[in-house]
Amino acid sequence: MSKPLAGLCFCLVMMAPSGMAQAQQGADGAAAAKPQEPVGFADSREDPNNTLKYAEVHAAQTDELIPFSPLQPLRDSSKAFNEQMERAAHIKFGYAFHTLYQRASKVRPGTDDSGIATDFDFTGRWALVRRGQPTQGALFFHVEGRWDYGTTGPLIIGLASIGTAGGTANTYAAYNPAFLLRNLYYRQGSAEAGWVFRIGKITPGAIFLTSRHISPNATYLPIAGTGLFTAGFADSGLGIVGARYLSDRVYIGAGIIDANADRYNFGDLGAGDFYKAVELGVKIAPLTEKAGFSKVLLWQTDARKDGQPINAMTGKSGWGVSLLAEQELTHDGRLVLLGRYGRSFDKAAAYDQQAGVHLLYYDPFDRMGDDVVSTAFNWIDSADEGTRDEYNWETFYRFPLLRHLDATLSYQAVFDPASETSFDFSSVFSLRLTTVF
């Protein structure tokens, strides 16, 4: 299967359709358009390309609960520095801070029931060719830092203290060392150009089966609610991915990544073990221009050379299929429904089966525009032997507390933790603070 997928990736890279519409250009060559949230292939908020776009969207935020902005001097300095760097060297930087406090009502004896952690992202883009054009080529880097305040981070509260397979706080646990190079790649093209590809150190879980409505830093918290781990994603490593937009409503993407990838290093590409995936994206019944794509992913992976689990992989060879369905329910795009399901085979992914349904309502009070209330229900059939089916219900409200500082109040009900049978239920309360600039 490796050779056909590698060939498909090559075709995606090389095929640039003619006659595609060009973005309206300003005098300096930059696209003169209002900042928009990404839609399409690799539209995760955590993707480095999108982190920079969301910083622009966040900078345009005009409403807040408390009319005060203690971060404004820092934001102004960052904006001035970015403008200077773009003029001088076509380089742009972005920063994101996400801090989470979480407390559980029921945990295993002798374990922590609360914790605080920060997830920090430093992203950069160096525009190299066709600057300001839909076919722009740029070098991206992404340094991620994660640290706890105490002995246990919120991610460990869910996995170790409660015994869940789906976790309660994706990404919120310390790295050791605290900072690492998560992404480093060259990217060229765009949806407007009709094609896009990237090559280098990449993160497949932030590329495939993604939606701007699903994010551990902006919307849902548990692993079960933010990632389809039935897709057996390899860790961040060397690879190539690309997509060809057949129309404004259909694309096909593909990728091949080192199965021995490890976010702490550059893996072992020479071992010849690969994670391969093909994704089809379709807008089924869009009601607005910002409608998202429904996506289906077919994947296969070789076994890791050490046979050890990492990210969504168990270390074994196998394959699977996963689906993400997204649909606007109102003509203003404020009410959005998502459904997700995945199935893996040969025990190659962390979950044998997984399903979830998510309902989001943006600007529910017609006053701030940047707030959202949501509820979600997730089910997991873990690949670990001897575990039981696990269920998670989550509801949250995210709102701009201060100018450019979002707060999220979240509640989770965990039913039948997969690897714990001494109790059947735990409530989890969370407070998340986020700023992006």
Image (tube, grey):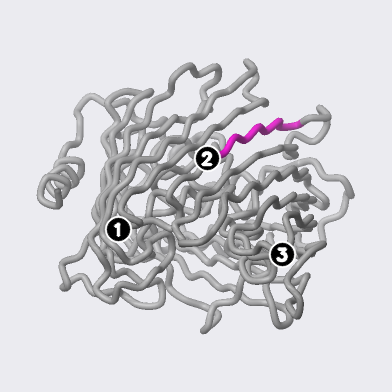
Question: Which residue does the image show at 25% across and 64% down from the upper left?
Answer: 303
| Apparent side of residue 5 relative to residue 28 in the rendered image (left or right) | left
Q: Main secondary structure of the magenta part?
A: strand
Q: Give the residue type that dot 1 points to.
A: Tyr
Tell me the element at label 2. strand
Q: Residues within 10 Å of mark 2 (few under 14, many from 20)?
A: many
Task: Give me the C-alpha separation between circle 1 and circle 2.
Answer: 34 Å
Question: Which residue does the image show at 78% across and 45% down from the upper left?
Answer: 399
Residue tagged by mark 1?
A: 186
Q: Which mark is residue 422?
A: 3
Question: Which residue does the image show at 55% across and 65% down from the upper left?
Answer: 121
Tell me the element at label 1. strand
Residue in the foreground of this view, choosing between 94 and 307: 307
Residue 283's spot in the image, x, y percent? 43, 23
Can the viewer see residue 197? no
N-terminal-most mark, 1 or 2: 1
N-terminal-most mark, 2 or 3: 2
Q: Which mark is residue 44?
A: none
Task: Give me the C-alpha separation between circle 1 and circle 3.
Answer: 50 Å
Is 32 covered by the magenta stretch? no
Task: Give me the C-alpha separation between circle 2 and circle 3.
Answer: 25 Å
Residue tagged by mark 2?
A: 355
Question: Which residue does the image show at 40% across and 33% down from the upper left?
Answer: 295
Residue 239's spot in the image, x, y percent? 26, 60
Q: Give the residue type that dot 2 points to.
A: Ala
Q: Give the residue type that dot 3 points to.
A: Ser
Residue 395's spot in the image, x, y percent? 74, 43
| Apparent side of residue 119 relative to residue 176 in the rendered image (left or right) | right
Magenta-tinted stretch: 356-363
Q: Are marks 1 and 3 in contact (CB under 8 Å)?
A: no
